[in-house]
Image: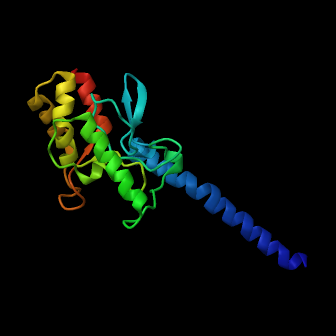
Amino acid sequence: MFKELRPAVVSFLLLTLLTGIAYPLLVTGISQATMADKANGSLIVKDGKPVGSELIGQSFSDPRYFWGRPSATGPMPNNASASSGSNLGPSNPALMDAIKARVQALRDADPGNSLPVPVDLVTASASGLDPHISPAAAEYQLARVARVRNLAPNTVNKLVADHTEGRQFGILGEPRVNVLELNLALDALH
């Protein structure tokens, strides 16, 4: 019996050493050496303190700021430990109720805005943590942010343009604006 057990135990210990210790240390070492910023969460640091991540959305509700996509995470918005979508399908009346409430909240925050509400301002992303909005979503909010901050719309528009990222490699994805980075630039300006 020990004759059969010994190779199994040795294999178990060897594989544990390789896959549980050596491989994670190797991957961690390579990532820290070649891309430490990304390996450490792509943190955004202001005045020496981390204020967020480029990769995880944050909830903004003050009209002085651009607002991101709604979050479906619970018990609070943009909860990285509860990353998930709402799982509400297009035939679910709760989805339409949520969208109508979000549209109304946007209209209430900026009553004079007659632009169509961009879809990404009223629908949650699949992860519930999307840090980006579309340029159209930023444009929809531009007049409100400029008015509340007493800034010229052209000034805010330039900030949005400066913080609009293009498609990856020129072909992948859509242009997007990182909401946290844009709001930090607004705070630095005013």
Left or right relative to 153: residue 91: right
Q: Where is residue 148 in the image (x, y as percent from the top left)?
A: 21, 25
Residue at x 83%, y 72% (from the top left corner): 6
The colour scheme applied to this rendered structure is rainbow
Quick check: 80 above or below 171? above
Residue 158, by quadrant, is: top left
Q: Where is residue 140 in the image (x, y as percent from the top left)?
A: 18, 42
Residue at x 63%, y 62% (from the top left corner): 18
Quick check: 121 above or below 58? below
User: Could you say which is closer to the camera, residue 10 or residue 178?
Assistant: 178
Left or right relative to 78: residue 9: right
Q: Is residue 149 visible?
A: yes
Quadrant in the picture for the C terminus: top left
Q: How many labels does the image show?
A: 0
User: Could you say which is closer to the camera, residue 28 or residue 186?
Assistant: 186
Quadrant in the picture for the N terminus: bottom right
Quick check: 13 above or below 29? below
Residue at x 41%, y 64% (from the top left corner): 92
Residue 105, by quadrant, is: top left
Q: Where is residue 186 in the image (x, y as percent from the top left)?
A: 24, 27
Left or right relative to 185: residue 32: right
Quick check: 72 above or below 76? below
Left or right relative to 87: residue 19: right
Residue at x 23%, y 49% (from the top left corner): 134
